[in-house]
Image (spheres, rainbow, N blue to C red):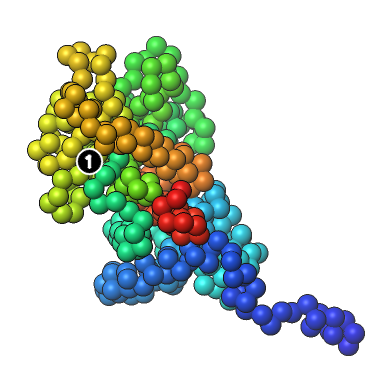
Amino acid sequence: MRGIDHQQADMYSYLSPEARVRADHPLRAIRTMADQALKSMSERFETMYAKTGRPSIPPEKLLRAQLIQMLYSVRSERLLMEEIDYSMLYRWFVGMNLDEPVWDATVFTKNRNRLLEGDVAREFLSEVVKQAQVKGLTSDEHFTVDGTLIEAWAGLKSFQRKDEKNEPPDDPGNPTINFHGEKRSNETHESTTDPDALLARKGSGKEAKLSYNGNLLTENRNGLIVNTEVFPANGLAERAAAMAMLEKIPGNHRVTVGADKGYDTRDFVAECRHLQITPHVAQNTKRSGGSAIDERTTRHNGYAVSQKKRKRIEECFGWLKTIALMRKVRHRGIEKVGWVFTFAAAAYNLVRMRNLLAGPVGAA
């Protein structure tokens, strides 16, 4: 027995997670930037919990765990808890000792949802952007805007008539519903599980799905995300969200904004110019009445540069949908979807900034 006890003792490691993570690991730079942002938010956390008391899980650890979920595409909170339990790297990033018990998935979700109710994600993104500005990674003059559909966490079977009294389903998990011959629209129908989600399609001939409209404002120097908006997918959301984000650009200096053909409308172009924003929008010459952008704008070299730079925003959407799992969001309600979309944008920035700072600034 003494021999067995001696062998078991040899299995224990007295090194901390900090000592086991190599100095040049990519997560080190990301955690340093994340911790700086979280430190700047400490007063907000204290204000949030002044009346209700501090949660059982510190908000800083909750948000670091949320970052791990997005950075490593962990599909559920339950799997995230399991991964943190087994991974020394994840424990180090979150700020847990090797012998510290991992939270129950239900407890984690309940505590995290308290943060979802506040404007925490937007402030976290703002703090990350401030770091990028200090490091000279952003432009304060040239921007790009675009939007995309985000599939909602609601099935088409939940999309039912608003004025119809629904009978209890024959199978709550997978009810039998006959939509044959029924015309469905957002005016007459809504989802019973996520009323904020609207039926939308990406283009002609595409399948209609319950969706939200996720929008980004990026700067053109390195393609970092500076603002986000999630709107109902009503067909007009992209231009409305764009104006909401453009109005929040600080300063009184003239700026430019690149965008695709979907933004080539007279109303959008006029509103941009009213805000002292030069609209570098791609021309839609096939639109009835022609393009709202004429040679006064297109003849300048800056217009061509904006058209080239604006394609970088697709890289943001690609990362958010494939890595951060934003293709089909796992939250319901526009407020929660907006929170997680904004936090994912901050996660993208942390990865992008780490890559930029690892090499020549602005070289990417």
The percent position of residue 42, horizontal first and vertical second, equals 33, 73
Residue drawn where x is 65% and y is 64% of the image: 86
Residue placed most toward the observer, 361 or 252: 361
* Vertical arrangement, residue 189 with respect to residue 243, above or below: above
- Is 280 situated above or below 356? above
Q: Which residue is mark 1?
A: 256
In this view of the protein, can residue 146 be seen by the observer? no
Q: How many marks?
A: 1
x%, y% of residue 280? 24, 33
Left or right: where 17 falls relative to 204:
right
**Which residue appears farthest toward the bottom when viewing the image?**
2
Q: Tag 1, which secondary structure?
A: strand
Instruction: Give above or below for 289 relative to 216.
Output: above
Quarter of the rendering containing residue 347: bottom left
The amino acid pointed to by label 1 is Thr
Determine whether, in the image, residue 280 is placed left or right of residue 154.
left
Q: Residue placed at 9% from the left, 38% from the top?
A: 274
Closer to the camera, 105 or 260?
Answer: 260
